[in-house]
Amino acid sequence: MGSSLLVRALAPPRSDGVLSALERRHAHLTRYGSGKAALRDGLAAIADGSGSVLLPAYLPDGVAEPLYELGLEPRYYRVRPDLGPDLADLERRLDDGTVAAVSVDYFGFPQPRLAGFASLLADRDCYHVDDNAHAPLSVADGTLLGTRGDLGITSLRKLLAVPDGAVLYCSGDAVRERFEPSAIAGVRERFDGSDWLFLAKAVATGALESNARLRRSAETLLASRRDGSAPPSASARYEAGKRPMSKLSVRLLEAADPDAIRAERRTRYREWLRFLSAREGLQLLRPELSAGICPQAVPVRTSAPERLLDDLEAAGVAGAHTWPRLAGPVRADPAYATARRLAEEVVVVPIRRRPDAAGLEAR
Ligand SMILES: Cc1ncc(COP(=O)(O)O)c(C=O)c1O
């Protein structure tokens, strides 16, 4: 986080930042601490504690947590190598107990075959959930991603370094009529301990960035902690995010300029596309950058993900990773072969820094 953003965030609240930009595009928006919390309240409006929700097989395991809490059964439909839905498989899996199906705008790009997806659901009288967790500011054909279903979500901490934050869009009339925000909706009234911790870390990170020795020793410390303790479970992460949005997040989001963020992300994306397209053995999954898209990261597919990750790490590019950790039922079932291979072979390359700033050159 730049120090100027921090200073602006601590000044009195403004109303021309990221949240205001989303509100201008969609009137029925509710704030939350996490995308999964937003999904929870959205699904609670359309489901009565029974039935199933169809999710894409290519999805982090944690997204099913709100379904379990609401007594809904997660079922998974197959995806194709372009990350879009296998519509024939979706159709086979829709039945009388299906309450809703979720489409995902991966990495801030509109999901392929969305029109076919939506019309299948309309024919079967199922709700459509538009999950745009990855890139809140992406707009396709004049419509904000996340707002194209009956309800939708986006997650703000994937856009900016904020402590938490997400939004629920209630787009359909039926959802709007039935929606009742629960105690985890809205914004926390006060700055709290987690906000101060976040600020302290941001300040410390600034110091670390300019001091390589300090950074290396912090990394060693973190690595040793990682060895010793298991990562938090999906349900623990869900519970932790089940609260209103932090007050500090609101300040930071409103202090940020959405147009400037989008322009910068697009420039970085193009730079990384140029760099990555010059490497052999990589398939760019989203090589086109249409107007309005504000990408989260560059997804590439490779049969040698470790090699790419090693090269990026050696160049000091932090945060590249394969994605995601799939749900248990998907990992266990050969019917989801495509999603399983994608989860092994898709590397998500962050675009916060320029590739040449990391000393990377096309080979
Ligand atoms: C596609 C997708 N949907 C929903 C979520 C949940 O968002 P959050 O982490 O804000 O709960 C994630 C999180 O990574 C995600 O990748």
Image (cartoon, rainbow, N blue to C red):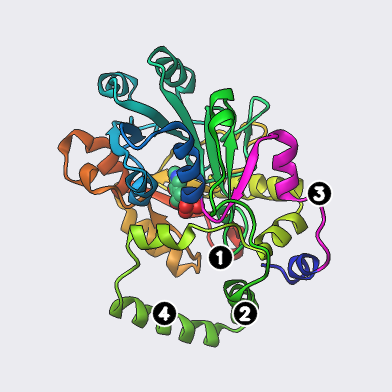
Q: Which mark is residue 16?
A: 3
Helix, strand or loop for disc 2: helix
- Looking at the image, which is closer to me, 363 or 285? 285
Q: Is residue 184 left or right of residue 71?
A: right
Mark 4 vs mark 3, CA separation in Å? 37 Å
Q: Earlier in the sequence, mark 4 or mark 2?
A: 2
Residue 110, visible in the rendered structure:
yes
Residue at x-position 40% and y-position 33%: 47
Mark 3, Cα crowd under 10 Å, few <14 / some 14-19 / many 20+, is some
- Label 1 or label 4, whichever lies nearer to me, is 4
Mark 4 vs mark 2, CA separation in Å? 17 Å
Q: Which mark is residue 359?
A: 1
Q: Which mark is residue 222?
A: 4
- Label 1 or label 2, whichever lies nearer to me, is 2
Mark 1 lies within 8 Å of ligand 1 (Cβ measured): no
Instruction: Report the amino acid beneath label 2.
Output: Ala
- Looking at the image, which is closer to me, 179 or 238? 179
Residue at x-position 40% and y-position 51%: 347
Helix, strand or loop for disc 3: loop
Circle 2 is placed at which residue position? 200
Residue 109, visible in the rendered structure:
no
Circles 3 and 2 in contact, beta carbons < 8 Å: no
Would you say residue 282 sits in the magenta stretch? Answer: no
Instruction: Provide the residue span drawn in magenta.
Output: 11-34
Mark 1 vs mark 3, CA separation in Å? 36 Å
Q: What quarter of the picture does the N terminus occupy?
A: bottom right
Q: Which mark is residue 206?
A: none
Circles 4 and 2 in contact, beta carbons < 8 Å: no
- Label 4 or label 3, whichever lies nearer to me, is 3
Give x and y (percent) for residue 24.
75, 37
Residue at x-position 29% and y-position 31%: 78
Q: Earlier in the sequence, mark 1 or mark 3?
A: 3
